[in-house]
Amino acid sequence: MQENSHSTRDSGRPDKPDVSGGSSRDSDKVSDQGDSPVGVSGAESKGSINRSDNAAARDNVLAVGSRTHAGSGFHQNLASHQGGSSRTHAGSGQPKQRESPRMGVLKSPSLHIVFGVTLTGIMGVASVTPILPMISDQFGVTPDQASLLIIIFTLPGVFLTPIFGVLGDLYGRKRVLIPILLLFAVAGTACFFAPDFKTLLILRFLQGIGAASLGAMNVTIISDVFHGNDRTAALGYNSGVVSFGAAVYPAIGGALSIIGWRYPFLLPILAVPTALLVLFKLKLPPPRRNIHVPTYLKSVHRTLSSRKIRIMFLLSTSTFMLIYGPILTFMPFYLEHYFSSSALVIGLIIASMSLGNLISGVLLGYLSMFFKTLELLLISYLMVAASLLMIPMMPNEWLIMIPCILFGFAIGINNPNIQTLIANAVRPEQRGGVLSVNGMVLRAGQTLGPVMMSTLFVFAGYVGAYILSAVLSVLIYLFLRTRM
């Protein structure tokens, strides 16, 4: 995309006041309408936005949009970059019948490459969890110690994700993304040759450095390219890809473990062709030049001080605690303890969660037309609680697929809406830094989830740990109702 196209897009959208201090209803309305930067001026606006202000803002958007189209042809460039999502015919000012906003988003070549980055990022956990019991037996370590392979992989992201995000804002996404993809490939493949558990932990830590910013970077790139409902749809599709990967990788990891427990560690080599696609095919707006770093850091700090942003970060942390604790880390041990499940069966059962996630990811763009963002988030936490309560009630291993599918459906609603709220609340030049902080707290959730379940398991056993995890989801629901 041309640099002038990028600047035109930014200038063609009037700034909206910060609504983080307003009522929950007004805050939610503005977030759903599109980009609504917060913390980008010397003083944040306070109070709610009335209906007449919203009407005036919409009139300004229409007026500026018509001038932008008449003078620059920006929409034509954006259409070719996003796969045909423009609202106008090339060369004419007449609106055209838009085939389907969701299908237009899916045609974007850049989105396809982002899907590759997404699949790489989730590979490091999803392909390994089915073989944790085998690694525990191989090296003579306890389940708690084996779970360190997940914890130490996610730990670098807690500290490094914000740094990579800021570097992406300042110097460009590609210059950060390509090296970390290559590090992920090299360190991850080296795990295949680890002679002992200590060496395996060290290599997993290095691989975790490479994976640290992948989840935040792909969301940032989607937010750079898409806006409004297209952004929500693209994030929903990306969530569906996460579901697909989370379904395929455990099954692949379990199948490869039939040959030997080491073989799932050959999968990270697939990050090399992904890095080549990013280098040669990914089209992104160029980084903004002559950025004054202290001013940039102050503006990001103001945005991060927003009450609404802090609540979104808290939700990200808690959501990923529930994914990585009860499901991805302890589900294999639960299945082996109660049903003596094989690694392949464990992988298939965990993969069933992704079926629900895939369905909700595909439907999210349509659900957002009928439900407010807050309503979808509240529903998702109740569904998570119900699914966690159902797991210890299932009489055989295959029936556990039912709560896993329900859990996946809830997460497919939950995570993209949180990401959309954050992306809509920041300016493009701050987006990498702010979303990388969200990636940091997300990594914190990935790291704390296994720790939480280990603690609950010590005091309450497997069944009690799942019941208390469901209670946590209900508490998040109650918190969200009172705070938003």
Image (spheres, helix red, strand yellow):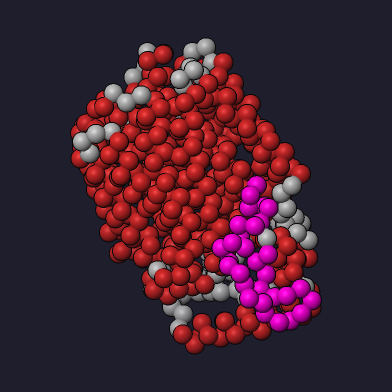
Query: On the image, which quarter does residue 447 sit in?
Result: top left
* Percent x, y of residue 145: 37, 22
Question: On the picture, is 182 further left or further right than 307?
Answer: right
* Percent x, y of residue 99: 61, 69
| Predominant SS along the magenta part | loop
* Percent x, y of residue 203: 55, 23
Q: Is residue 1 above or below residue 407?
A: below
Query: On the image, which quarter does residue 63 sit in?
Result: bottom right
Residue at 63% over, 82% down: 62
Q: Is residue 286 above or below residue 368?
A: above
Q: Is residue 133 visible?
A: yes
Residue at 53% over, 54% down: 237
Question: On the picture, is 387 further left or further right than 105?
Answer: left
Question: On the picture, is 165 further left or further right than 78?
Answer: left
The magenta region covers 84-113
In the picture, the quarter occupied by the C terminus is bottom left
Query: On the image, which quarter does residue 346 sit in?
Result: top left
Residue extending farthest bottom: 52
Task: Check residue 142 for magenta coloring.
Answer: no
* Percent x, y of residue 331: 33, 33
